Image: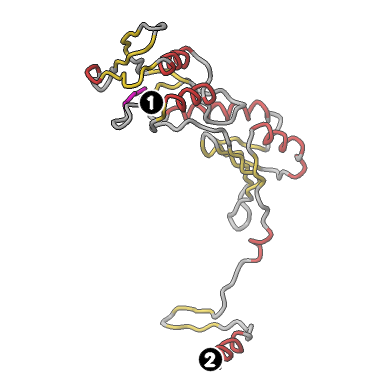
């Protein structure tokens, strides 16, 4: 009790003291730069439209030199020029909150069907996958036909007629991945089916097959969109 009281009394001393030990300078207080508390907090946005609207309606609040940096396919920052301390103000953080398909994971028939219809742009291969997945027979993935590239499965082609088909692979799909204001590139995927060893249920998965090139394409689309939307603002440089 007495020890704690003495430590409390000693702690009341607000004076800053310095001491050199082994040629190193030590201080008895932890100090903070006051300027850090005066820096602006970035505005959080989630669409390119809101970003453009802010720049156009709040032009008077934007310094002489600004940079729109496309950090990623779904992330953009509006930052200022270097100040005297070589620091930059971060004015806006804009990130896409688009729901994305979980690539590389196995999905049940129902999960896969719902995801295809809600998270992908309609195209020929999407319609083909919906047909295959919607008519698959439980326990129908023919293992004898799987050579690592090509698979066979049994689908219902009528009330009681069944037929074996070659599962399409690769497939070209257009998933929603970024800001909805820009176009999304068509990308090739490896489409695979498997059966659950315990239940015999058929599951499906999509694996990316373009090495991530789609990210660069989307970033280029974002840059074109911003350059066109903000072409009158010569003080804003757009970097991707």
The secondary structure type at the circle numbered 2 is helix
Closer-to-camera residue (161/193): 161
What is the secondary structure assignment of the residue under circle 1? strand
Residue that numbered label 1 is attached to: 204
Q: Is residue 234 visible?
A: no
Residue bearing the label numbered 2: 3
User: Which numbered disc flags the more N-terminal residue, 2 or 1?
Assistant: 2
In the rendered view, tell whether residue 41 sits above or below residue 17.
above
**Residue 16 or 192: which is nearer the viewer?**
192
Tell me the mark number nearer the camera, choosing from 2 and 1: 1
Q: Which residues are magenta?
A: 190-195
Confirm whether the magenta stretch covers residue 193.
Answer: yes
Q: Residues within 10 Å of mark 1 (few under 14, many from 20)?
A: some
Along the viewing direction, whichever of 73 and 145 lies nearer the viewer: 145
What residue sits 22% from the left and 18% below the top? 144
The structure residue drawn at horizontal position 65% and vertical position 48%, both measured from the top left corner, is 42
Residue 28, visible in the rendered structure: yes
Report which quarter residue 112 is drawn in: top left
Give the image location of residue 106, x and y in percent.
38, 31
Q: Are marks 2 and 1 in contact (CB under 8 Å)?
A: no
């Amino acid at each position: 009790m007495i020890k704690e009281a003495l430590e409390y009394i000693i702690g009341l001393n607000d004076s800053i003291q310095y001491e050199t030990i082994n040629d190193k300078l030590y201080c008895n207080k932890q100090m903070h730069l006051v300027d850090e508390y005066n820096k602006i907090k970035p505005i959080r946005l989630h669409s390119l439209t809101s970003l453009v609207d802010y720049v156009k309606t709040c032009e008077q609040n934007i310094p002489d030199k600004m940079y729109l940096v496309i950090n990623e396919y779904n992330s953009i920052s509006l930052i200022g020029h270097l100040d005297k301390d070589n620091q930059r103000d971060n004015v806006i953080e804009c990130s896409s909150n688009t729901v994305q398909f979980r690539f590389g994971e196995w999905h049940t028939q129902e999960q896969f069907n719902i995801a295809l219809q809600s998270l992908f742009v309609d195209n020929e291969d999407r319609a083909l996958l919906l047909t295959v997945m919607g008519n698959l027979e439980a326990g129908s993935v023919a293992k004898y036909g799987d050579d690592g590239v090509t698979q066979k499965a049994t689908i219902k082609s009528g009330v009681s007629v069944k037929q074996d088909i070659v599962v399409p692979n690769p497939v070209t799909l257009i998933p929603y991945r970024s800001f909805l204001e820009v176009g999304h590139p068509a990308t090739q995927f490896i489409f695979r089916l498997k059966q659950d060893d315990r239940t015999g249920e058929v599951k499906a998965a999509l694996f990316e097959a373009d090495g991530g090139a789609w990210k660069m394409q989307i970033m280029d689309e974002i840059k074109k969109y911003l350059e066109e939307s903000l072409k009158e603002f010569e003080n804003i440089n757009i970097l991707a």
